[in-house]
Amino acid sequence: MTRHKLSLGLVGFVSLVLGASAAYAAPPSLFDLPVLKLENLPSGGQSLSLSLQTLILMSALTILPSMLLVTTSFTRIIITLSILRQALGTQQTPPNQVLVGIALFLTLFIMTPTFKEANDAAFQPYSNGQIGIEEAGIRTAAIMKGFMLKQTRQADISMIAELRGDQGYQSAADVPFVVAVPAFLISELRTAFTIGFLLFLPFLVIDIVVSSILMSLGMMMLSPMLVSLPFKLLMFVIVDGWSLTLNSLVESFTRG
């Protein structure tokens, strides 16, 4: 009797497994998935389907950090702070995480008006269904381009335009986005190194003075960097160097 029940149980289990296998044996066909296509609008024209819009947005998330670096004030701020740390001679103090955090929040502070404009002109209308994703992207790119061109030298725009084969542009609206981004980066690097040079000079003077004094005293074995570090830190604290540096960075964008 026990063997009979065991046999019946085994048969039932095998039947259950075979039934489940049959249910999952045929995966959904690719043609059963949502179609990535263009949809006709009632007012005329075409718009991307929801599936294709989702695919584009998910793909854009992978390049969003890079876009944050190259189209905002982050580049100038992080380079200036790195040069300042090098001038102080404090090695890894403040650590990289602190410098990046300062740069990110200062970038958010500087870019808030631009982000608010993009939200009002592009994101909110897109969320309310008033415009499509293509129009939202065009409006956002135009707003970001406007910010970048305010900080970009005309010479850098002309250089990138020549490399692209363009003869020139009549107005800022005619400058393509692919030209504005590299020109903006070149201008930002130049400005950051200029500010870094001005920050480096007073600390360099302290190093030279300390080295001269140590050599005149015959202390050849004593590291000048070790002796000058307390004086540089003292001077930086007395003049409230962090406030002056961050204030100068913010004003450099405001004046631009």
Image (spheres, rainbow, N blue to C red):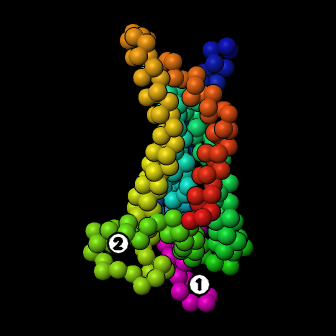
Residue lying at 32% horizontally and 68% vertically, measured from the top left: 159
Q: Which quarter of the rendering shows the C terminus?
A: bottom right
Q: Name the spot of residue 247 as percent of width and height, x first.
A: 65, 50
Q: Name the spot of residue 76 as percent of width and height, x first.
A: 51, 51
Drawn side of residue 230 relative to residue 130, left or right? left
Q: Name the spot of residue 77 as percent of width and height, x first.
A: 55, 48
Dot 1 falls on a residue whose secondary structure is loop
Residue 114 can be seen, yes or no:
yes
Residue at numbered disc 2: 158
**Three-letter residue code for mark 2:** Ser
From what the image shows, is residue 76 above or below residue 89? below
Dot 2 falls on a residue whose secondary structure is helix
Residue lying at 50% horizontally and 69% vertically, measured from the top left: 149
Q: Which residues are magenta?
A: 37-50
From what the image shows, is residue 97 above or below residue 65? above
User: Of the residues tagged 2 and 1, which is closer to the observer?
Assistant: 2
- Residue furthest to the bottom in view is 43
Residue 41: give its label: 1
